[in-house]
Amino acid sequence: MNTNPNNNLLAATNIYEYFTDKIEDIITMLILADNRADQNSYSGSLGLEFYIDTLKRERDKLQSKVFRFLVIGDKNRGKSTIINVLLGEELLPEGAVATTAIPTFIKYGEKKKMTLYYDDNVKEEISIADFSKRHTHSSRQVKKAEQKYKKTRLRQLVQQGLDRVSARSQLAREWINKLIGTINYACLEAPVTLLAKKIEFIDTAGLNNSEIENEKAFGYVKNCEAIIFILDPNDQVSLTDKEYLQKLLDSQVSIENIFFLINKWDNVEEADKQDIQEAFTINLAQALHQEPRAIEQLWGYRIFTISAKNALKNLNRRKACQGTGFPEFTTELSNFLTYERLSCKLAQPVKVTKQVSELVIQIIEQRLAMLQDDIVTLSEKEQQAQPYFAAMKDICSTLEQQVNKIQEQSAIAIVESYKKYFTMACQNFSQNSLNLPNLDKIDPKDRDKFTKQIQEKIYQFMQDKFREWNEQSQAKINIKNDQLKIVFHENLQKYLQYKETIQNILVTNNDAAISETNPHYIPQNPEEINITNTSSKSRNNWIIAGTTTGGAIVGGTMGVVTALSITPVGWVVVGVGVISAIGIGIWGWIWGHDLKQDQFRQAIKKQLARKLPEILNKKKLTLLSNHIKSQFNPWYETIKLMKDDIASLEISLNNLISQKHQHQVDFTLEQERLAKIKTNLTIKSQSIIGEYTNYITK
């Protein structure tokens, strides 16, 4: 019987290793083939360096791939215990690390140790025991120390003139700083089997910590395969849970990527379980903007009831975890990684391997066709091909200039639109924007409750504004990408025709090639080529990863830039904390000055104007500009592939001429060697494609 639920998670990592090894086999074969090509009797290197490097990059991506899980939820919900169960041993101090507000990365290491990373780029290595002693406390100790500190400090802040709302906000930040000092995050390493298989966890601070720490937790989302969201059976989706689930949705996290664990299910009375499950269904439906029927289907698929403490006890006693909910949860998590995430992650390496194999086979066929040419013939062919090589290089330069121009224009335009949009949003903000009641009618004793509601409304108002701006920016980037698609389509058609012409020069009998009456006539000027005659059925239509002749020429690699990758509603760029600060600062100031209704409009505008620099500061604008520019990277990658393609053709031809200058090539022997490489490469490539096809159709 499988007593350890983490065994379910190992299946996905084994698939990665399989495909990594297969790609490594092809790399080794190509390196060996090219290294032997310079021996006597052989025809010289095929110039495969660029293709080998391309395969190495895909291999390295697979080798460096980490399955990372973000464990998130409010304080004291058993996050550390859950991670310990998944790890298969009691590694994290329970009831301690979870209450520190220090995000903890758990990854593989040859020995158990904790490394603390401070804000000033200083790091400190300590033992797990020392870390627990110096930086963690029990929940009761933390609460007691926190209450004592805040009671004294709140009085001081109020005496200094701060209203209670602003004072509480400042206290939250001060307490976190007092609790953890300048520690940014911690990294726990251990020689655990699961971690050795490239599975990592991020144990976040509780969600009721400061906005700064909450922001930090959500900054990790984009680097994780899945979110493990911990819920409390006694509070069926709290307001805090709803707020953070909304942030996950705003960060474009699919519901499919969130696993909800209702921990401490063993503490629930049997008679209450059905009612609690129904309450979770209704509340999750509201939080996730789904119909209750859709949420009902997630039970046992994305929603699980678990008992982490019982599971850990069973593991320590080497007993099975049946009845704790973990076998069911880890089985579905493994299926998710294996059949949903992996199929996407493997698609690019498999596709690149197929295309590189076809390109290399093409080069081998060209070499076979030229083996019996003498040096004079080869030199003449090289001279004939030079104008077309030059024309292909000019195309690369033209495309690069176009991308540079559009990239710069886009960054400037979107940054300016960002500044203008939010300046206008703040200037036009009014009471009507929030649909508020008359402030004069708010009883002073209800101000704290009312202020919290107002902060949520301001948060939603700014969130809506970010969405509007993001949609406008999305449209602008799409227009620019459409322009580049047209430019690339036109130039790639010409590029492909030039390449086909070069290939015809190299593989055609030289006497026939120079005859204008011959149907295989090669024009002496690249401009003579009529690009409308490019054959989409040509065996030479592969040029770069993801591009072929015909309508699909801008697909594949270039297709990924169709969508704007600006983080939705700009959380990474502008930060959630800025929005919260606006709400707290404005309303704390208004209550502190006891403003009347007729003074409200001008007061809120003045406070928004003071907060506006936080949204428009130079650092954020620079981040935004760089982020926009990065959206054009796939176009540059495509140009690089084109340049590598040209270089490979030239190197292969030059190597053959050089080799024939030095000694006589044994035609029969070389033909056998090249044919064997072609056959083996075909077999290995088809094997990878076949395995991937079988894998995704299971």
Image: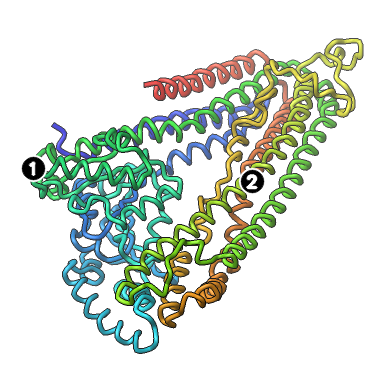
| Quadrant that contains the N terminus | top left
Residue plotted at (43% across, 49% down): 223
Using the rendered view, name the quadrant where residue 558 is placed: top right
State the separation of the CA atoms marked 2 and 1: 58 Å
Please name whichever residue, 635 or 26, is drawn nearer the observer in this view of the structure.
635
Q: Position of residue 4 (x, y in %)?
A: 18, 39
Badge 2: how crowded within 10 Å, few (<14), some, or many (20+)? many
**Element class at badge 1:** helix
Residue plotted at (47% across, 32% down): 24
User: Which label was assigned to residue 271?
Assistant: 1
Residue sticking out furthest to the bottom: 159
- Could you tell which of marks 2 and 1 lies nearer the N-terminus? 1
Determine which residue is flagged by label 2: 632
Q: Is residue 333 visible?
A: no
Residue plotted at (48% across, 37% down): 59
Residue plotted at (30% across, 43% down): 259
Please name whichever residue, 94 or 161, is drawn nearer the observer in this view of the structure.
161
Badge 1: how crowded within 10 Å, few (<14), some, or many (20+)? few
Q: Position of residue 245 (x, y in %)?
A: 36, 50
Examine the rendered structure and indicate whether residue 525 appears above or below residue 214. above
| Quadrant that contains the C terminus | top left
Of circles 2 and 1, the one toward us is 1
